[in-house]
Amino acid sequence: ENIDAHDRDQIYLAPGAVVFGSLNIWRVHNVHVFGRGTIIYDGPQNPNDDEGWMHKPNWHCIVMDNARNVEIDGITCIVRSRTWQIQMRDSRNIGFYNIKVIGGSTNNANQDGMDWLGGGDTTVANSFFRAADDDFAFEGNWGGYSREAMEKPGHDVSNITIRDSVVSTSISNIMRVNWPHKHFNSYHVQMKNMDVLHTGFGACGVPFAVFELWADPGGSGSHSDYLLQNIRLDDWYSLAGIRQPGPEVRDIRFRDIWAMDSPAMVSS
């Protein structure tokens, strides 16, 4: 069964409860989801292609569209199909606390941990993410891979704090901003006190990194005020890759970065 939230819902998943389906928080406000239960999503996506970007109900473990004032505490998401795990479009005032997001599709691909398609004002804390693509991805919109869809201007992504958490990805970045040919702005993003168990190994034509801002060629927008602080790296590939042809990237700061045992495999 899928869970469709309504305005002012209090949704409790008790310890031991297992729901097969999606949590849809679609154009509603003041929703609280909490407990120690589990949502297992195993959808109809083609395992051999990327259909996981589609923004619609019942297509992700958790999906939000123009939601406001949402808090999610304690639950676990397990995603078995090739889809983005938590997807939010133009949603703000969102909190995720002590959640676990665990992906494992057959082809180990196209399975982001959390995506912002516009929106923000979000806190993620005390959580665990295992993704088979970017753990955290910021895009102004996403309507497919056509050139027309890519060049459609998107909405700002802003005011995001990710802290006190453990993350791992098999084939991509811990944090990715933008995409070739996309146009939007992002600002005021912090990722602090994090254990990075594994970052992806290079593909898609560029090396993957803990922080990747990839808008080359043709992407644009102002991306500013990013802070990555007190990050501990294990089995990592590269710290940063910043590729945007326009000179509107500024104030990207790294402080107290620790690497366990091994150096980077490629230069930032």
Image (cartoon, rainbow, N blue to C red):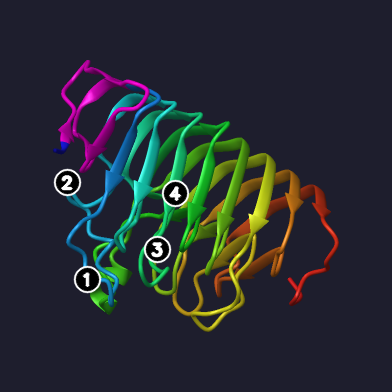
Q: Quadrant of residue 245?
A: bottom right
234 magenta-colored: no
CA distance for labels 3 and 2: 25 Å
Q: How many marks?
A: 4
Quarter that holds the C terminus: bottom right
- Residue picked out by circle 2: 57
24 magenta-colored: yes
State if disc 3 and disc 1 touch (CB < 8 Å): no
Q: Quadrant of residue 28?
A: top left
Q: Is residue 228 left or right of residue 259?
A: left
**x and y percent of residue 169 in the render?**
54, 60
Given the image, on which type of amino acid does mark 2 rest? Pro
Q: Give me the disc on residue 183.
A: 3
CA distance for labels 2 and 1: 17 Å
- Write down the region rendered in magenta: 3-32
State if disc 2 and disc 3 touch (CB < 8 Å): no
The structure residue drawn at horizontal position 28% and vertical position 65%, both measured from the top left corner, is 152
- Residue picked out by circle 4: 102
- Residue picked out by circle 1: 46
**x and y percent of residue 99 in the render?**
46, 33
Name the mark nearer the viewer: 2 or 4: 4
Closest to the observer: 218 or 2?
A: 2
